[in-house]
Amino acid sequence: MHRMILRVCSVLVFSTTLATAIGSNRIDNHFHALPPAYIAALNAAGGDPSGYPTPEWTVDAAIKSMNDVGSSVGILSISSPGVPVLGTGPEARGLARTLNEYLGNITAHGKVKDRLGFFGVLPDWQDVNGTLAELEYLYTEQRLCNGVTVFTTYGDKLLGDPLFAPIWAALQQFHALVFIHPAVLPVNPPFIASSLAQPIIDYPLATTRTAVDLVMTGTFRRCPDVDIILSHAGGAVPFVGTRAISSLAIPTIANEVEYSAIHAKEDFSRFYYDIAVSTSAAQLDGLLDFAESSHILFGSDFPYVPQLGISALVAEYAAFVASNPRGSDVGPDKLRANSLELLNKHAQKKSF
């Protein structure tokens, strides 16, 4: 056992050295913040309903993590459950504003402002008017965010639900960049093996369901100026997206959803994908089979993945880049260029 531990540590040290050698100046698009006001609200609501432990976070710890993996820029976001943990009333609206002011302050005026951006925080989309009001604040008053964080479901509704049509219209109006992060999947039983936290298995499935829904409802097509980043390499989208597209060859399905396979293929090709916790050869090869290499972005999932885990995932990614025939398609310079183009396309006051 002792020899095995030493061997694993030696491989990790070697791989981490390799990762550092081939990658620097990364832009981290999946990089979370847990401000004090959010932690207080989360604790008051009884904690994270996904079953995953809530990590500690500070700005200094975030910068240290960036330095450890060679990231020059991190785009902060609030992970799920987010503001919806407080429901849909005035208290939740107030928390969204507080968090946006906090993130705006540290990315515009903080001591490390040149290294940080943020995705704006929104209320539960079931509070349509509250969400529209916060979008108005973010894009016409504050004008600092690089985009907005959206969760895969609100209540029992996927993002293509007709209730949310006014929100998508506003996102289209503002030419917004949308970072979709998975939320609790409303299934029974809620946890695999009674206690396995949803982020382990169910979160990728939540992303898959909402991405397919956005395509099949025509929601994404009605928003040609909105770009969407899917977390964790799109969950299972690279593996089952073709099933959704192919299903439209069945007349009854095509007639029911009133959508064509040609349009579906075009719309799936518009998604962007971060590779947070998605760096195995199977995942990266599958993603490259399904998506354009220009739509792949780096992400670490700090601090929900501990630093040792992030280093191991970056090492795994580095080994793929160094040894796979298609490694250069997702090399560090390529992913940085992809992020710069996307973020600057949607920049308000701040570009990188």
Image (cartoon, rainbow, N blue to C red):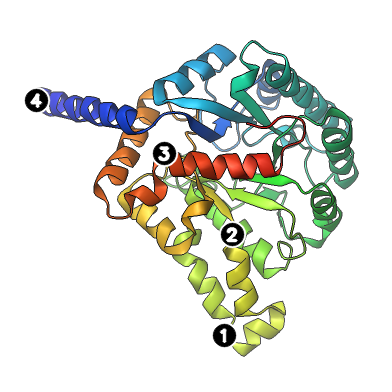
Q: Residue at x 50, y 73 (%)?
A: 243
Figure quadrant of the C terminus: top right
Residue highlighted by disc 3: 332
Three-letter code for the amino acid on which mark 2 is drawn: Arg
Q: Residues within 10 Å of mark 3 (few under 14, many from 20)?
A: many
Q: Is residue 294 left or right of residue 120?
A: left
Cα–Cα span, label 2 and label 1: 20 Å
Residue 182 quadrant: top right
Residue highlighted by disc 4: 3
* For marks 3 and 1 on the same chain, the one whose residue lies earlier in the sequence: 1
Three-letter code for the amino acid on which mark 3 is drawn: Pro
Residue 341 at x, y percent in the picture:
60, 44
- Work out whether 331 lies above or below 76: below
Q: Nearer the viewer, residue 107 or 350?
A: 350
Cα–Cα span, label 3 and label 1: 38 Å
Label 3, secondary structure: give it: helix
* For marks 2 and 3 on the same chain, the one whose residue lies earlier in the sequence: 2
Task: Evaluate if marks 4 and 1 touch, with contact meaning CB atoms under 8 Å apart.
Answer: no
Q: Nearer the viewer, mark 2 or mark 1?
A: 1
Direction bottom: furthest residue = 251
Q: Nearer the viewer, residue 174 or 122?
A: 174
Q: Residue at x 67, y 32 (%)?
A: 351
Residue highlighted by disc 1: 249
Residue 80 at x, y percent in the picture:
63, 37
Res 59 visible: yes
Q: Nearer the viewer, mark 3 or mark 1?
A: 3
Q: Nearer the viewer, mark 4 or mark 1?
A: 1
Three-letter code for the amino acid on which mark 1 is drawn: Ala
Residue highlighted by disc 2: 209
Three-letter code for the amino acid on which mark 4 is drawn: Arg
Label 4, secondary structure: give it: helix
Q: Nearer the viewer, mark 3 or mark 4?
A: 3
